[in-house]
Amino acid sequence: REAVDALLAVYSSSIIDESSDEYVVMRAFALVLALLRCKTATSDKLLLWNKTEDAEKSFFQNRKLMESFSHWLQETCSVDMAHEIRAALRQNDTHKAIFAALTAGDLLKATSVASDAGYLQLSTMIIAGSDCAESLQQQIQIWRESGASKYFSEGLLRIYTLLSGDLRME
């Protein structure tokens, strides 16, 4: 397994063009490796096909598999998101940069961009995460009912909506 990891690392470092077929193949192999690494302590079977009657064990296995897949997805998208964030910042579109960082799961970058742009309360909400989601949902509803939401830029409203956990906007 370590040899395959090393080979994948060498191969991936030689690929410059992220839009190339080689890059796609390398990311596909990275996904397979991520899924293969999801083994239970008691079993050598791939979790995807490891059926168990024990609900707690099954939950743990599925959670571990989803965490591995989520990590792979975040890693795969990070290059594209980094480009998108830089492009948005070059265009002075802070809201787009923050939104891109949030959707990429890069809370540190989102917080940093928000803070650098002077959105200190927003950066605090990003750090707070789901702790402020319900209050933010209520606040957005108040803004909409009172008509105050029309004074927000669409980008900022998208960020608040995403932080509130409401994905219907997208």
Image (spheres, rainbow, N blue to C red):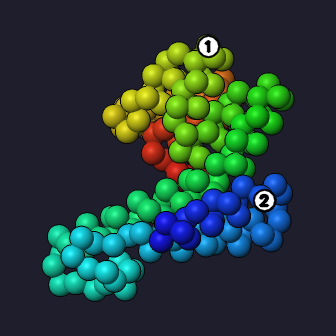
Q: Residue at x 82, y 61 (%)?
A: 19
| Residue 58 x/y as whole percent | 24, 75
Kind of element beneath mark 1: loop
Q: Is residue 141 above or below residue 63?
A: above
User: Is 107 on the left-hand or right-hand side of 11?
Assistant: left
Mark 2 burial class by Cα count in 10 Å: few <14, some 14-19, many 20+:
some
Closer to the camera: disc 2 or disc 1?
2
Identity of the amino acid at label 2? Ile
Q: Is residue 170 above or below residue 127?
A: below
| Residue 64 x/y as whole percent | 34, 64
Q: Find residue 109 and name its label.
A: none
Kind of element beneath mark 2: loop
Identity of the amino acid at label 1? Gly
Closer-to-camera residue (167/49) = 49
The residue identified by callout 1 is 118
Q: Residue at x 76, y 34 (%)?
A: 86
**Would you identify the image quadrant in which residue 9 lies?**
bottom right
User: Is 35 on the left-hand or right-hand side of 9?
Assistant: left
User: Which residue sits furthest front?
Assistant: 3
Q: Is residue 70 above or below residue 37?
A: above
| Residue 83 x/y as whole percent | 76, 42
The CA distance from mark 2 to mark 1 is: 38 Å
* Camera sees residue 148: no
The residue identified by callout 2 is 15
